[in-house]
Amino acid sequence: MPRVDNHTFYDDALKTHGTNAEGVQWISEETQRVRFRVLRELLPEDLSSVELADAGCGFGDFLVYLRERNQTPGRYLGLDVMAPMIETARARTGCEIRRCDVLQDPLPEADYYVCSGAMNILTWDETQSFIRNCLAASRRGFVFNLLKGRDTSLIYNCRRPTEIQQLADTLNATMRVREGYLAGDFSVLLEHC
């Protein structure tokens, strides 16, 4: 079970901030876009034939970001557990957005899975399961970001790249990591060997 109740965590932000970056618990739209830029850089240059599944898609903001740059994937599928986010993402993107719990439900296959922020309140065991599940459902790889630091927060899941490397080794996956774009954050590409 996450460190805090998932529904309360996001419902409170949604009620306070509405359907924007703060409504999905990001500090600002600017920092959200910085994270999206780094995730995009870890994906293949040409997305036109790529099937992309967005785990914890929130309001579909990552697809909106890609569309603004004329980098729409061949197929986009959003996955989320929060009904208000699913409804907004469907309206905002016009794409298939499914209610799905990545930790418990079967995942559809896609070329790449991407996740921005959805693991931030999970426990370490849940984070490992989330990564395993998304990588297993991907044909090519999984791109995600995590908060960087020691695991001492009562709310947030902070990890270190070395922990993810150890997990990647057990999953027989190659790993690329990006750091330094924001304090307390890192992004990872895991690809099947």
Image (tube, rainbow, N blue to C red):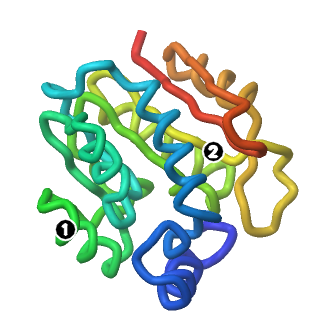
Q: CA separation, marks 2 and 1?
A: 25 Å
Question: What amino acid does circle 1 point to?
Answer: Arg
Image position, residue 143 (x, y; %): 45, 33
Residue lying at 24% horizontally and 21% vertically, measured from the top left: 46
For marks 2 and 1 on the same chain, the one whose residue lies earlier in the sequence: 1
Q: Residues within 10 Å of mark 1 (few under 14, many from 20)?
A: some
Query: Helix, strand or loop at disc 2?
Result: strand
**Residue 81 horizontal side relative to residue 86, left or right:** right
Q: Nearer the viewer, mark 2 or mark 1?
A: 1
Residue holding disc 2: 146
Q: Residues within 10 Å of mark 2 (few under 14, many from 20)?
A: many
Image quadrant occupied by the N terminus: bottom right
Q: Nearer the viewer, residue 30 or 79?
A: 30
- Of the numbered discs in the image, which one, if any, rests on residue 42? none
- Of the numbered discs in the image, which one, if any, rests on residue 90? 1
Image position, residue 184 (x, y; %): 77, 45
Q: Is residue 171 above or below residue 68?
A: above
Residue lying at 60% horizontally and 17% vertically, measured from the top left: 169
Question: What amino acid does circle 2 point to?
Answer: Leu
Image-quadrant location for residue 135:
top left
Image-quadrant location for residue 20:
bottom left
Image position, residue 163 (x, y; %): 73, 31
Q: Nearer the viewer, residue 95 or 108?
A: 95
Residue lying at 65% horizontally and 30% vertically, measured from the top left: 164
Q: How many marks?
A: 2
Q: Nearer the viewer, residue 158 or 87?
A: 87
